[in-house]
Amino acid sequence: MRIEVENLYFSYAGKREKNKKYAVDGVSLTIEEGDFFGIIGQTGSGKSTFVQHLNGLLKASDGRGRIKIGEYDLGDKKTDYKALRSKVGMVFQYPEHQLFAETVKADVSFGVKNFYPEKSESEIESIVKTAIETVGLDYEKIAEKSPFELSGGQKRRVAIAGVIAPRPEVLVLDEPAAGLDPEGKADFLNLLKKLHADFVKTIIIVSHDMDLVAEYCNKVAVFKGGKIVKSGTPKEVFSDEKAIYGCGLDLPVTEYLIKRLKERGIDVESGTTVAEFVSAVKEKFGGER
Ligand SMILES: Nc1ncnc2c1ncn2[C@@H]1O[C@H](COP(=O)(O)OP(=O)(O)OP(=O)(O)O)[C@@H](O)[C@H]1O
Ligand SMILES: [Mg+2]
């Protein structure tokens, strides 16, 4: 499903309030099917407000703006939001805080049952099993446990299993790696990579972590004051050092090194991933690592 957002406005202020401040202030953006799309920007720039429009949790203020997600036109009164939400899964910051059921199995099956009430118990069980195994947990060991007995990392995986179980095509994650230790973060990012490779078509990730975006995303949009001030490939976006610093952001370490080397007269032609950077440096200087 392709996502097309055109001139979207959203304000938390009341309808009649004058001189409203817009948390999303005229945003247009296209996200193609298959993208691993990064959304970056300083705190308060409108990232979370924006992504909450993608499954209709928030709606354009005063009808200003248009969102099309595949065949769903979100301005249309007849839009089936339940069907849309089965296609666009949303994972909020600290998703483990949303676990509530007595067992892992009950928690993960909640969304599936809600979206597909016609499915039999055995069909649901098999869907839940697939989701739990996809997030790297052992179904037999964990299904009947209380989610509250699990480790932090396991809880987060269970929460994600619940969102992916109905097989959404698009997965939106708002700061999903927040609060994880470096090892937990690396595991978690590998999981996202795996999900993108064989479970969900499109991933949209809101993150403060420029290295993560530089490493995983094929497209990035930079928010500032509710507007998109820059978008494109990570290379296009992060090469514009002035714009990045102007938005109160940092460069990813790869692009930072490329720039500092260039100032010293050393041109390293490289993309923004670590592998690309290492291979460009090897090419430049020769030798083995
Ligand atoms: N529930 C709310 N009620 C009123 N104003 C809000 C609400 N949520 C956010 N805002 C305001 O809307 C603007 C955008 O906030 P938003 O949470 O979308 O930013 P963000 O980019 O996600 O920030 P962060 O990186 O801190 O998560 C900010 O000015 C914020 O204060
Ligand atoms: Mg936010």
Image (cartoon, rainbow, N blue to C red):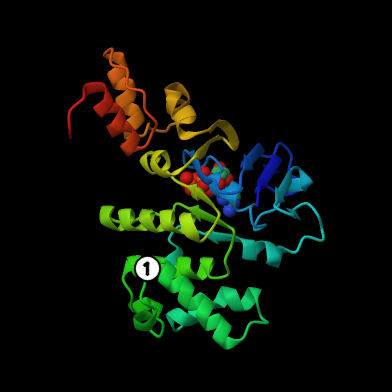
> Which residue lies at the image location 78% right of the left edge and 47% below the top edge?
63
Q: Residue at x 56, y 81 (%)?
A: 124
Q: Quadrant of the C terminus?
A: top left
Under circle 1, the secondary element is loop
Which three-letter amino acid code belongs to the residue tagged 1?
A: Gly
Residue extending farthest to the top is 265
Residue 99 x/y as whole percent: 46, 73
Give the residue drawn at x 42%, y 53%: 193
Locate residue 154 relative to residue 39 in the image: left or right. left
Would you identify the image quadrant in which residue 281 lies? top left
Residue 50, above or below 289 = below
Residue 131 location in percent, x, y?
47, 71
Task: Name the residue carrying label 1.
Answer: 136
Q: Quadrant of residue 277?
A: top left
**Cβ at disc 1 under 8 Å from ligand 2:** no
Compared across the picture, whether 92 is left or right of 177 comes to right
Q: Residue at x 46, y 57 (%)?
A: 93
Q: Nearer the viewer, residue 28 or 126?
A: 126
**Residue 60 shows up from this direction:** no
Query: Does any portion of residue 169 appear in the rendered image?
Result: yes
The reply, left or right, for residue 6 in relation to residue 170 is: right
- The x, y position of residue 82, in whole percent, is 69, 67
Question: In the rendering, at what x and y percent does residue 245 appear?
Answer: 42, 27
Seen in the picture, residue 50 relative to 281 is either above or below; the reply is below
